[in-house]
Image: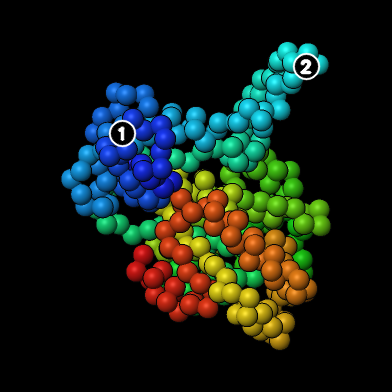
């Protein structure tokens, strides 16, 4: 199992004997020895290269611990005038796939089952980060460095084809009804609407790049990672592109204004480069995004280290 949280037994008040606890950090690989106890598992920390076997909290125990609501913060149950406890009936919520993002927010990521595999080449390279940190620059550099090794997806759109436009050059054009049907059938990795037209990344387009013998580079929204992460066909290597700091971020924005590159961004790539006050929000958004996506990341890089990141991508 891969641990997705950090555990320190010396700080665990629920552990019967803290000396028999097994410490681990987020990302460590744990070999589970015994799961008979519903609250405590016996495990070995493979990452620490130690033969020590200790106790770690079970999935069920850690879920209860993290979902615990203190009585003073419990607003579901009200206190009556005379001190009687009034229970408010909870409405049963059924899971609906169309609302899965809301359920994902409540999902507790604690342990992930993993298995040892021989070295293999990744099929997709995913760049994650907020707007304005250099994902598009890194993507273009990689593709231009070797067009036979790296490839990009041509997006689909329901927008009418303009004069001199060719199907499959900048976009694949579809009828609006046809594209809406494909969206309902979960054929798109991600999609959005701009000026009344749909734009999106079709899963088959990703597979076409892979089938051509190239690694497909994706610059997608974080919500799409769940589809990629659980797909054996796509096997992503995920790079989180972080901002270097306020001063370097100002330089990136100044370069974009000088080159006018913001005019070439697509509908969902409009970065916040118009107002300096948004630079700080970019850093705040990065911190929030990193906290959520950390379990799925393969590499973290800073935007001004694009050359070293390019070398790392080559080795994947």
Q: Label 1: state its secondary structure.
A: loop
Considering every residue shown, the one lying at the far bottom of the view is 258
Q: Badge 2 local density, few (<14 within 10 Å), some, or many (20+)?
A: few
Pinpoint residue 66: horizontal percent, then vertical percent.
52, 36
Q: Nearer the viewer, residue 267 or 25?
A: 25
> Where is 123 relative to 1, above or below?
below
Instruction: Please tell me which residue is depicted at 57% across the width and 71% down the height of the picture.
Output: 243
> Where is 4 relative to 70, above or below?
below
Q: Nearer the viewer, residue 225 or 202?
A: 225
Q: Is residue 249 left or right of residue 175?
A: left
Q: Nearer the viewer, residue 5 or 204?
A: 5
Instruction: Please tell me which residue is depicted at 46% across the width and 52% down the height of the picture.
Output: 296
Q: Badge 1 local density, few (<14 within 10 Å), some, or many (20+)?
A: few
Task: Give the mark nearer the N terminus: 1 vs 2.
Answer: 1
Pinpoint residue 203: horizontal percent, then vertical percent.
54, 50
> Where is 42 relative to 36, above or below?
below
Considering every residue shown, the one lying at the far front of the view is 82
- Colour convention: rainbow
Per the image, the residue denoted by label 2 is 80
Occupied quadrant, residue 316: bottom left
Q: Quadrant of the N terminus?
A: top left
Q: Which mark is residue 140?
A: none
Q: Nearer the viewer, residue 205 or 277?
A: 277
Instruction: Please tell me which residue is depicted at 49% across the width and 33% down the height of the picture.
Output: 65
> Where is 133 relative to 81, above or below?
below
Pinpoint residue 237: horizontal percent, then vertical percent.
42, 58
Instruction: Please tell me which residue is depicted at 75% across the width and 53% down the height of the picture.
Output: 193
Q: CA distance from mark 1 to mark 2?
A: 41 Å
| Residue 266 shows in this picture | no
Pinpoint residue 147: horizontal percent, then vertical percent.
46, 73
Q: Label 2: state its secondary structure.
A: loop
Per the image, the residue denoted by label 1 is 17
């Amino acid at each position: 199992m891969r641990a997705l949280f950090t555990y320190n037994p010396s700080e665990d008040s629920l552990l019967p004997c803290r000396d028999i606890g097994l410490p681990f950090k987020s990302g460590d690989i744990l070999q589970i020895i015994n799961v008979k106890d519903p609250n405590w598992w016996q495990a070995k920390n493979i990452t620490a290269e130690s033969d020590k076997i200790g106790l770690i909290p079970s999935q069920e125990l850690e879920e209860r611990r993290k979902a615990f609501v203190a009585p003073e913060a419990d607003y579901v149950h009200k206190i009556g005038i005379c001190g009687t406890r009034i229970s408010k009936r909870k409405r049963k919520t059924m899971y609906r796939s169309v609302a899965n993002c809301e359920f994902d927010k409540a999902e507790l990521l604690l342990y992930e089952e993993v298995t040892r595999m021989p070295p293999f080449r990744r099929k997709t390279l995913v760049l994650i980060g907020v707007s304005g940190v250099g994902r598009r620059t890194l993507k273009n550099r990689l593709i231009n460095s070797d067009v036979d090794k790296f490839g990009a997806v041509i997006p689909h759109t329901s927008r009418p084809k303009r004069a001199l436009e060719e199907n499959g050059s900048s976009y694949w054009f579809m009828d609006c009804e046809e594209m809406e049907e494909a969206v309902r059938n979960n054929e798109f990795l991600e999609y959005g609407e701009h000026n009344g037209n749909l734009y999106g990344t079709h899963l088959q387009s990703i597979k076409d790049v892979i089938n051509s013998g190239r690694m497909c580079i994706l610059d997608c929204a974080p919500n799409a990672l769940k589809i990629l992460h659980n797909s054996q066909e796509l096997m992503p290597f995920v790079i989180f592109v972080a901002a270097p700091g306020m001063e370097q971020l100002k330089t990136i924005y100044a370069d974009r204004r000088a080159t006018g590159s913001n005019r070439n961004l697509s509908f969902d790539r409009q970065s916040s480069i118009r107002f300096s006050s948004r630079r700080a929000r970019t850093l705040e958004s990065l911190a929030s995004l990193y906290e959520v996506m950390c379990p799925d990341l393969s590499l973290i890089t800073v935007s001004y280290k694009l050359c070293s990141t390019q070398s790392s991508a080559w080795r994947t």
